[in-house]
Amino acid sequence: MVSRCFFAICAIILVACSIQFMAPSFSVHMRKYGFSPAFIGLCFAIPGIIYGAVSPLMYLLTERLTKRAVIIIGTVLMSIGMMFVGTSRLLGFDNNPAIILMGMMIIGCSAGMISIPVLPEMIESIEINPDMHYNPEDLDNYLSGIFVVATGIGEGLGPILSSFLNEGYGFRTAQDMFAIGCLSFAFFYFIMVGHFYVFCEDPPHKTPGGHVEFEDEEDAETKPTVN
């Protein structure tokens, strides 16, 4: 269960790092190919607009899939979005504005899929562990603080990684390298915290007393406890 919390924290760092990764180099790269400042500004605005638009839908998604599954899918989409924005050499893309805009839309969607369920996933990973004793209010405060710190770490790492990779390999290759990193993280996340069952609906959880915790009070009255 601690590994679930650890990977969730890593996911926070990754999504913050991904957004800031493009900040130092994207506009410079786009100007080289003659794109206007208005188009570049539109590209930067799209992820935030899409993030806000898809946020209400994340609740519906986590109703059907586990939070881990949503985060893993979001990380895979982040990888795809980074390749589209970089007009990937690996995929043989040209510097097509439509591909870049599509990539920004995918990044905005994936950012919502990672950052929205990640804090509830951290809390749940601790709460279902019967060996851990905690005060619920303190737990929420501690994990909220960790969330903010992890976001700050990611926002700091993004520009630093971008500067080194762009200096050494160029924008398009740097985007591909970061995308491969996102995909690798999604793979290890999948292997370490659940395999295929994470794509099923969350089962009822055991409380520290050994009882099954149901969401509905009526269900709790009609279904037996587990000893």
Image (tube, rainbow, N blue to C red):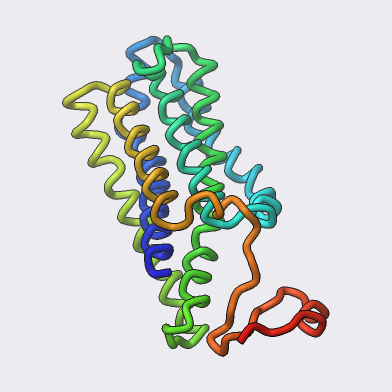
Tell me residue 198's x, y (percent): 55, 54
Tell me residue 28's x, y (percent): 32, 22
- The image quadrant where one finds the C terminus is bottom right
Tell me residue 17's x, y (percent): 35, 45
Q: Residue at image x 44%, y 49%?
A: 190
Q: Is residue 206 left or right of residue 64?
A: left
- The image quadrant where one finds the N terminus is bottom left
Tally of marks? 0
Q: Residue at image x 80%, y 85%?
A: 221
Image position of 189 with respect to 3: above or below: above
Q: Residue at image x 42%, y 47%?
A: 15
**Which residue is at the front of the view, 121 or 54?**
121
Image position of 172 with respect to 134: above or below: above
Farthest residue in the front direction?
227
Farthest residue in the left direction?
168
Tell me residue 194's x, y (percent): 48, 56
Q: Is residue 10 left or right of residue 108?
A: left
**Which residue is at the front of the view, 110 or 25?**
110
Image position of 99 with respect to 18: above or below: above
Q: Residue at image x 37%, y 10%?
A: 33
**Which residue is at the front of the view, 203 or 139?**
203
